Image (spheres, helix red, strand yellow):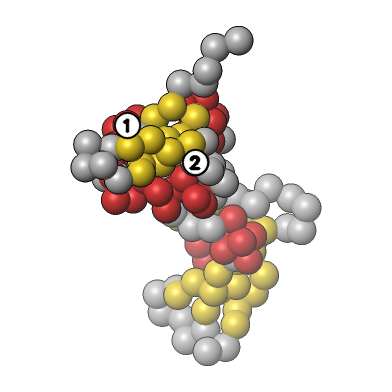
Amino acid sequence: MSAPELWSVAQVAEHLGIQPGSARGTLSRWGVQAAGYERGPTGRAEARYDAAQVREAAANRPGRGARTDIRKSAEKRTVRYVGGPLDGKTLDVTDWSDESVRTGVYEIVDGWEDRADYEPDEGGDPLLWVYRGPVST
């Protein structure tokens, strides 16, 4: 069986695409410990890390994968008002959170002192907001 490939901090940093000064802290956070020590060019002992462990830790590091909390800008979402003074009109809610869309709105209506309450039916299509009546402001 051959000895594992050992990397210096500089080699680890190059592999990870980070500065050498950040490599030790990153490895520590990932739980990768030095596999041994060798004398460096200055005569001081320098840590060496198992290259396979570094590669595995980098592949499994936090933040690898899709962000499910962010919508792709291509996924345009539009609400359609049903009933009341805004019947048939639409509202772009692409950048709104799912919770905000489920809540609905009190919409300002030209010529009204009150606002129009629109919200989706419970268990229904969250992008169809039904008129619930006027709301005093």
Q: Earlier in the sequence, mark 2 or mark 1?
A: 1
Q: Residue at x 36, y 42 (%)?
A: 46
Q: Nearer the viewer, residue 113 or 36?
A: 36
Q: Nearer the viewer, residue 96 or 67?
A: 67
Q: Can the viewer see residue 20 in this picture?
A: yes
Q: Residue at x 61, y 61 (%)?
A: 99
The residue carrying mark 1 is 11
- Rendered position, 115 above or below 58: below
- Rendered position, 73 above or below 112: above
From the image, state whether disc 2 or disc 1 is nearer to you: 2
Relative to 21, 89 lies left or right: right
Q: Can the viewer see residue 66 in this picture?
A: no
The image position of residue 27, as x and y in percent, is: 47, 45
Q: Nearer the viewer, residue 126 or 44?
A: 44
Q: Residue furthest left?
A: 42
The residue carrying mark 2 is 34
The image position of residue 34, as x and y in percent, is: 49, 41
The image position of residue 26, as x and y in percent, is: 43, 48
Q: Residue at x 60, y 72 (%)?
A: 117
Residue type for callout 1: Gln
Residue type for callout 2: Ala
Q: Residue at x 57, y 46 (%)?
A: 31
**Secondary structure under badge 2?**
loop
Q: In the rendered image, which quarter is residue 122 located in?
A: bottom right
